[in-house]
Image (cartoon, rainbow, N blue to C red):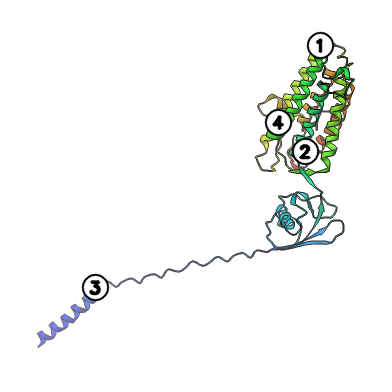
Amino acid sequence: MDALALEATGGKKAANGAAAAAPVPAPVPVKRKPAKKAKKAVVFFEVEILDAKTKDKLCFLDKVEPNATIGEIKSMFHKSHPQWYPARQSIRLDPKGKSLKDEDVLQHLPVGTTATLYFRDLGAQISWVTVFLTEYTGPLVIYLMFYFRVPFIYAPKYDFTTSKHWVVHLACMCLSFHYVKRLLETLFVHRFSHGTMPLRNIFKNCTYYWGFAAWMAYYINHPLYTPPVYGEQQIRMALILFLFCQIGNFSIHIALRNLRPPGSKTRKIPYPTKNPFTWVFLLVSCPNYTYELGSWLGFTLMTQCLPVAFFTLVGFIQMTVWAKGKHRSYLKEFRDYPPLRSPILPFIL
């Protein structure tokens, strides 16, 4: 019996040992779903647009996204007032302040979540390309009419006659080259930061260009025109100056075009390139105007004509105004702008 008891006890121990030796399955880990990130609440803006003159409420825009640009706000405003398309709108923070840029972002402006903006109507607009093409086509056509001496300009006996002075034909070729160059640059070179300008300006600009073209052409192509005092030597020197400055002007326009990617309004400091004609950038902010002035000085010496000299003087005054304005904007926008540069004439103006 003791043996039987021992066997029974040994069997139980063996069974218990076997049970203890059996591997216990590991618990399966429960996959926890990642906690959802709390979304930041978007604070929308309310934009109220008032008339800059009368302070009347024109439009109220609700739930405007904070990253909306002024250009987008103009488009929203246009939906409620179709007669004022975006190019015709001037949106500003103050009734008498400056217009905001289309790329200005609402949340970066000094306004609260309830913003008050002021609207001013700029009037009917026209594209810069159309204005330039009209300005430059007119002088070309008008000058050729005087050059070919169409009827009703000079005495009937001079109808469709030609001048005996070769400088008259050279002047026609130079002026035609100048305006054809301008037309081609308008179509294929220039990139405009502003797409439109007031429609009324086209009448003022065309009066200036067309009127001066007729005045110059009348005297240069007149049957009684007398050539320059110093003859061929003066004409050839003037031609060299004219062509040199025309090439320089074109080179500057190409350099300015390459500064701005297509479709953008990016502004950069213009610097000289490998083209020697662009080295004037070392001393002048607007060398395109410098070369333009040189071209008309050459044309004045070539023709020795008072109306041409007067046109050159008026053009120089206007280009100086533009150059000074652009020079000031460069200094204001770029802290590292080269201090040695002058607006239009090195070290002088």
Single out the mark in the foreground, 3 or 2: 2
Q: Label for residue 184? A: 4
Q: Earlier in the sequence, mark 3 or mark 1?
A: 3
How many neighbours does mark 4 have within 10 angstroms: few (below 14), some (14-19), or many (20 or more)?
few
Q: Give the side of residue 28 with respect to residue 298, left or right.
A: left
Amino acid bearing label 4: Leu
Q: Are marks 2 and 4 in contact (CB under 8 Å)?
A: no
Q: Earlier in the sequence, mark 3 or mark 4?
A: 3
Single out the mark in the foreground, 4 or 1: 4
Residue at 70 percent of width and 34 percent of height: 187
Q: Secondary structure at mark 3?
A: helix
At which x and y percent is residue 221?
85, 20
Single out the mark in the foreground, 2 or 1: 2
Residue at 72 percent of width and 24 percent of height: 247
Q: Earlier in the sequence, mark 3 or mark 2?
A: 3
At which x and y percent is residue 262?
65, 40
Q: Label for residue 217? A: none
- In space, the residues marked 3 and 2 are separated at their CA atoms by 97 Å
Query: Split into 4 quadrants, where in the image is the N terminus?
Result: bottom left
Q: Determine which residue is flagged by label 1.
A: 232
Q: Give the side of residue 10 with respect to residue 222, left or right.
A: left
Q: Determine which residue is flagged by label 2.
A: 131
Single out the mark in the foreground, 3 or 1: 1
Occupied quadrant, residue 157: top right
Q: Earlier in the sequence, mark 4 or mark 1?
A: 4
- In space, the residues marked 2 and 4 are separated at their CA atoms by 14 Å
Amino acid bearing label 3: Ala
At which x and y percent is residue 207?
86, 35
